[in-house]
Image (spheres, helix red, strand yellow):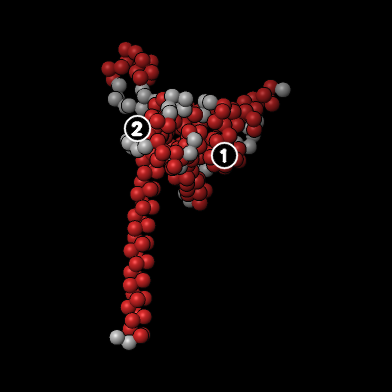
């Protein structure tokens, strides 16, 4: 065997070894990512059902069927894990909202109105609540729970405020006569109403009273997207009109 041939065979053997190493490494990375998602899914479910204080790292390990060390490796302390759970779905939800906003602005057939802007902002969230995916449902429930606790405001501002401000700015452009502070208050209330849509229709049934026999059977308030958007857009438009009313009375 010539020296060149021996070198060629050695090179092939080395190349095969590198390829085999890469395959093994890629497999470990895939398994590691699958385990990480398993931990985040478990944490998401538990936080949504029990709140931050009601969940321990041990609870999450048991729910994910992994060791305590695995949870710590993939997430760190509980507060950091909570942040990761909130953050991991923001990109998909915010991208859907911004795409709807861009489509609205770029389509000459569409009218940019309070209703169409709220539809672009709310419908992606309502759609995931209604999708039937238990993990997205848990996420929506967790967001609704978290926004009412002041201590999480820094995280929520980091994750959501840039996108909500983009929509609020567009609504202000649509209602230039409105008082900015009152309009911001009304928009914040509209967002809270949207987040509340993750709850069941039990209170709705109670309010129906004797009319319950004609109930449609819908399970969540999110199953009334047009009603919610009409309710919120009507409120924003009325707030804008209040300033004109005051100025006429002055």
Give the structural element (helix, strand or loop) at label 2: helix
Give the structural element (helix, strand or loop) at label 1: helix
Residue that label 2 marks: 62
The reply, left or right, for residue 159 in relation to residue 180 is: left
Total numbered labels: 2
Along the line of sight, which residue is nearer the eye, 167 or 136?
Answer: 136
Mark in the foreground, 1 or 2: 2
Q: Please state the horizontal and vertical placement of residue 76, each as a whole percent of the image.
A: 48, 39
Dividing the picture into quadrants, the one containing residue 222 is top left
The reply, left or right, for residue 250 in relation to residue 72 is: right
Real-space Cα distance between discs 1 and 2? Answer: 30 Å
Dividing the picture into quadrants, the one containing residue 10 is bottom left
Q: Residue 206: tell me if it is visible.
A: yes
Picture quarter with the C terminus: top right
Residue that label 1 marks: 158
Picture quarter with the N terminus: bottom left
Query: Residue 207, which numbered label?
Result: none
> Which residue appears at 54% of the width and 35% of the height?
156
Along the line of sight, which residue is nearer the eye, 127 or 32?
Answer: 32
> Which residue appears at 36% of the width and 80% of the height?
7
Along the line of sight, which residue is nearer the eye, 82 or 32?
Answer: 32
Q: Earlier in the sequence, mark 1 or mark 2?
A: 2
Residue lying farthest left?
A: 213
Q: Residue 93: tell me if it is visible.
A: no
The image shows residue 20, relative to residue 219, as above or below, that is: below
- Dot 1: within a 10 Å radius of its alpha carbon, few (fewer than 14), some, or many (20 or more) residues? few
> Which residue appears at 33% of the width and 63% of the height?
20
Q: Please state the horizontal and vertical placement of residue 26, each as a whole percent of the image.
A: 37, 57
Q: Please state the horizontal and vertical placement of residue 63, each as a whole percent of the image.
A: 34, 32
The image shows residue 113, relative to residue 2, as above or below, that is: above
Q: Please state the horizontal and vertical placement of residue 77, each as a whole percent of the image.
A: 49, 35
Along the line of sight, which residue is nearer the eye, 72 or 131?
Answer: 72
């Amino acid at each position: 065997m010539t020296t060149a041939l021996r070198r060629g065979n050695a090179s092939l053997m080395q190349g095969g070894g590198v390829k085999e190493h890469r395959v093994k490494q890629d497999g470990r990375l895939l398994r590691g990512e699958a385990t990480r998602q398993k931990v985040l899914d478990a944490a998401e479910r538990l936080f949504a059902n029990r709140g931050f204080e009601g969940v321990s790292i041990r609870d999450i390990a048991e729910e994910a069927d992994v060791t305590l060390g695995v949870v710590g490796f993939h997430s760190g302390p509980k507060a950091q894990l909570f942040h990761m759970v909130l953050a991991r779905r923001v990109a998909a939800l915010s991208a859907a909202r911004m795409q709807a906003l861009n489509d609205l602005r770029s389509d000459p057939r569409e009218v940019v109105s309070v209703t169409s802007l709220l539809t672009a902002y709310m419908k992606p969230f309502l759609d995931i609540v209604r999708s039937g995916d238990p993990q997205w449902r848990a996420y929506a429930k967790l967001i609704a729970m978290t926004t009412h606790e002041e201590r999480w405001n820094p995280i929520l501002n980091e994750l959501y405020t840039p996108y909500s401000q983009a929509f609020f700015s567009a609504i202000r452009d649509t209602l230039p006569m409105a008082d900015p502070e009152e309009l911001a208050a009304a928009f914040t209330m509209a967002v809270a109403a949207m987040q509340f849509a993750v709850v069941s229709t039990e209170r709705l049934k109670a309010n129906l009273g004797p009319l319950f026999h004609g109930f449609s059977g819908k399970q969540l308030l999110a199953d009334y997207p047009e009603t919610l958007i009409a309710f919120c857009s009507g409120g924003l438009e009325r707030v804008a009109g209040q300033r004109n009313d005051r100025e006429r009375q002055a």
